[in-house]
Each structure stands twice: as C-alpha cells, then as structure tokens.
Amino acid sequence: MNPSIKSLPETKLIGKKVRMNFLNNQTQALWKSFMPRKKEIHTRVDEDLYSVEVYDSLSYFDSFNPATEFDKWAAVKVTDLETIPDQMEELIIPSGLYAVFPFRGTDNEAPAMYQYILGTWLPSSNHQLDHRPHFTEMGEKYKNDDPDSEEELWIPIQPKSDD
C-alpha cells in the first residue's frame, strides 16, 4: 500500500492533551473528556477530528519502548487561536511533508498498519521520519471502532539524507 505524499500547511488545532505511554493508554478517557466539549470551540474549520501524537524526539522510534511517554491530543482544526475554552490548549502543527495512508478498520487493527508503515514502507521509501506531530484525521467516514470506519494516518516525512 502506497500513501499519497502531501504538503501540509501550518495547521492550528485546539483540544485537550494527556501525557501517556502505550502501557498506560489513556486515549479513550481523553476522547470521552473532549467530545462533549468540542462544541465550545467556535472557530472550527469543519467537523473532522484529529488524534495527534507529539513525541519528544525522533529517537522514540529507534528503539521502541511502550513505557516511553508522549503527548496525545484530541483536537479539531480551527481558523484562529483567539479564543480557547477553559482546560483546552492550542497546538500548531508546522508545515511539512506527510505520507498519508488511508485506513479502514477498528482501533485494534491500527497497530498492524503502523507496524507496516514504520517497518516496511518507510525503510523502502525515499523518505525518513521528520520530527513533527503524527496524526490521524477522522472525517465524515469515521465510525468509532467500526470495521467499516475510514480515516487517514498522517506520518511526517522528509527526503532521506545522504549521510
């Protein structure tokens, strides 16, 4: 499966975040706390949802450890950051190249897809990971944990360096 390569402009998000790791996965609790409050964000661009991971460094992927922490976000894209509801924060995703993979399936099937992307596609491509947020965009075809659910996995990339 080959992704489309897209250039993402700087993207402004507002949402909630938690510091977590894969051993203490708090994704469901994060979304349960965010979804009832998303209507408080009045500058939303659309109805799409963004599940974002911000890793402290690129070395996170060099020797994967499920206990290593990262920031997980539940957010929406906004036109501006003028008004941020209480207990929410802003996140700006810098512009850059992304490999965009369509994904269809349940949450339990996603780890195999990420393993393919990072373990098979990326090493054989002309790209390497870039140190920017990774995210999933969940649009109108997204159906929470349904086998027919569709979303897009956005992986930050840059051309491989010749070192």
Image (cartoon, helix red, strand yellow):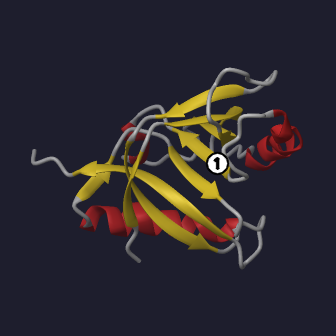
In the picture, measured across the screen, residue 44 lies left or right of residue 96, that is right
Q: Quadrant of residue 107?
A: bottom right
Name which residue lies at 68% across and 53% down: 48
Locate residue 117, reporting x and y percent: 42, 65
Instruction: Report the amino acid beneath label 1.
Output: Tyr
Q: Is residue 127 above or below residue 18?
A: below
Name which residue lies at 70% across and 33% down: 18
Hey, which residue is sitting farthest right in the picture? 36
Name which residue lies at 73% across and 47% down: 27
Name which residue lies at 69% across and 33% down: 17
Identify which residue, 100 or 63, lies in the foreground. Answer: 100
Viewport quadrant of the C terminus: top left
Viewport quadrant of the N terminus: bottom left
How busy is the neighbourhood of tag 1: few (under 14 within 10 Å), some, or many (20 plus)? many
Secondary structure of the residue carrying numbered label 1: strand
Identify which residue, 83 or 29, lies in the foreground. Answer: 83
Locate residue 158, reporting x and y percent: 28, 48
Locate residue 80, reporting x and y percent: 62, 29
